[in-house]
Amino acid sequence: MRVAAGLSLVALALATTTAQAAPAGGGAGGQVGFDSSGASSSGSSSSSGGYQWPERVISGNAVSLQLPLQIAFLGYMPRVRIGLQYDYQLHLPHWVHIGIAALLDRGDFETFKLDTCGFGANPPSGSCQPGTVAGFDIWAGYAYKWYLKERPYLVPYVRGSLGGGWWRYPDVTASRLQSLQWSGTFSLRLGGGARLFLLDYLALGIDVALTIGFTQSLNIPLGGSEEKVTSFLLGMEILPLLLEYRF
């Protein structure tokens, strides 16, 4: 009897020790990953109710779709801008990027900020009709992206880029839409924005940048010879709709 009682006490002690060492709930405690700047982060994988924001976001590479417009304060730029950008993480918050965009617009000589459409102050009836502008834009630059420890799913950043573009104006026909044939630009873009990650690899965002540079245009006045005109360019990229995918 004494031996049996002793064995029972030993078995009870071992069971108590095992129960204390097991994790609460009987499952994995949490997940560990890396935030957008490369710093480690951890948190419980279970939800306490409501929307579960990502506790980390993927780093390394990103592709973003950028919409939809830009405006010019001095000079002219096509207003619709549909771009695709690739970002690469150099180290922690330091990223570089390259991009390309389609430029589109529709307007007349007043849209292009010209004094006349080429017929002078009194154009014939039916002249100066609006037309379509189409072209492209390319750029490359650097971005610094912050890591917010309490909100790793929100990524603010500042950026600087160098870029150039080209677009063609509506054809100059009998209706004499305008005297400009095409324009090319070179500019510095300084700005910033933020990304809100709905998933660890997918985010919505907004971006605003100031554009400073110059435009060179081919101009053919009515009855005159062609000439190239260089002018100062000051404008702004306003991209209220961004979709970013990280991998």
Image (spheres, grey):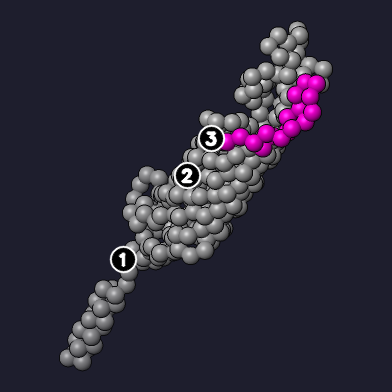
Mark 1 lies on a secondary structure that is: helix
The span from disc 2 to disc 3 (Cα, nearest Å) is 12 Å
Mark 2 lies on a secondary structure that is: strand
> Which residue is outermost to the left?
2
Depth check: give the residue in front, 104 or 173. 173
> Which residue is outermost to the right?
174
Instruction: Say whether disc 2 or disc 1 marks the residue closer to the N-terminus.
Output: 1
- Residue at the spot 55% in from the left edge and 31% down from the top edge: 74
- Residue at the spot 71% in from the left edge and 9% down from the top edge: 122
Taking the image as shown, residue 46 lies to the left or right of residue 223, namely left
The mark closer to the camera, 2 or 1, is: 2
Magenta stretch? 216-234
Q: Which residue is mark 3?
A: 235
- Residue at the spot 26% in from the left edge and 82% down from the top edge: 14
Taking the image as shown, residue 183 lies to the left or right of residue 17, namely right
Q: Which residue is mark 2?
A: 191
Q: Which residue is mark 1?
A: 24
Inspect the image, locate mark 1, and give the three-letter code of the amino acid beneath it.
Answer: Ala
Instruction: Say whether disc 3 or disc 1 marks the residue closer to the N-terminus.
Output: 1
Depth check: give the residue in front, 139 or 21. 139
Depth check: give the residue in front, 244 or 127. 127
